[in-house]
Image (cartoon, rainbow, N blue to C red):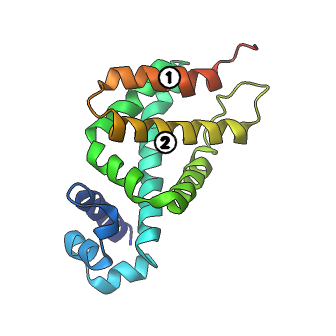
Amino acid sequence: VARSRAAMRQALLALLERMPLEDITGAMIAKQAKVGYATFFRHYVDMRALLVDTVAVLTDELAQGMMPALLAADSGGAASVLIHAVQARRTVFRALLSGAGATLRAELARQVIERVAILPDFSQSWLPRRLALRIAVTGTIELLDWWLREEPDRDPPDVAVLLDRLVISPLADRTEK
């Protein structure tokens, strides 16, 4: 079960490198993953379910990559890790951000918030945790979308500084203001 699901997630990511999300079908996923078409439907009710599962795994990978820097109170390092991970798969992230549509994008943001809610709380003491998570996730999504679509030539280190200054530092700074 785990291998089939992983293969289908990888298939989705591989297909996103070549085509928009809305053009990808369950049959294409099954073929790319080298699993039977019925196997796709045994694991996922539709493409949306596969997409949510894939985003959950990506979120976990990104959060794990950022965690050492966050634990060390290095918000700039955390931002750099995230931006470089996105840069390494920029076609995939661009397809995910632009192809999801407003309703699915909001659902994916909610899923990401739920995933990161189990991590240690780095928000300021006066700031409600769920609000901090909502601002961090939506701010990050908007920044990534802006970068990948409107400023694709901007250097990743510059984008990491923006992410740190606009999203991470203001939310994680422990000093009372």
Q: Gap between marks 1 and 2, in whole Å?
A: 13 Å
- Do the CB atoms of the residues marked 1 and 2 lie less than 8 Å apart? no
Q: Establish if 81 lies above or below 148.
A: above
The percent position of residue 71, horizontal first and vertical second, equals 55, 24
| Closest to the observer, 51 or 3 | 51
Identified at 36% across, 20% down, the residue is: 158
Residue drawn at (37%, 35%), measured in percent from left and top?
Answer: 147
* Horizontal side, residue 144 vs residue 156: left or right: right
Q: Can residue 51 be seen?
A: yes
Q: Quadrant of the C terminus?
A: top right
Q: Which mark is residue 32?
A: none
Q: Secondary structure at mark 2?
A: helix
| Residue type for callout 2 | Ile
Q: Which x, y percent locates residue 59?
A: 46, 47
Q: Residue furthest right?
A: 126
User: Can you say which quadrant of the picture contains the N terminus?
Assistant: bottom left
Mark 2 surroundings: few (<14), some (14-19) or many (≥20) residues within 10 A:
some
Label 2 sits on residue = 141
Residue wearing tag 1: 164
Q: Amino acid at mark 1?
A: Asp
**N-term-proximal mark, 1 vs 2:** 2
Instruction: Give SS at disc 1.
Output: helix
Residue positioned 24% across, 74% down in the render: 28
With respect to residue 1, does 88 lie above or below? Answer: above
The quadrant where residue 89 appears: top left
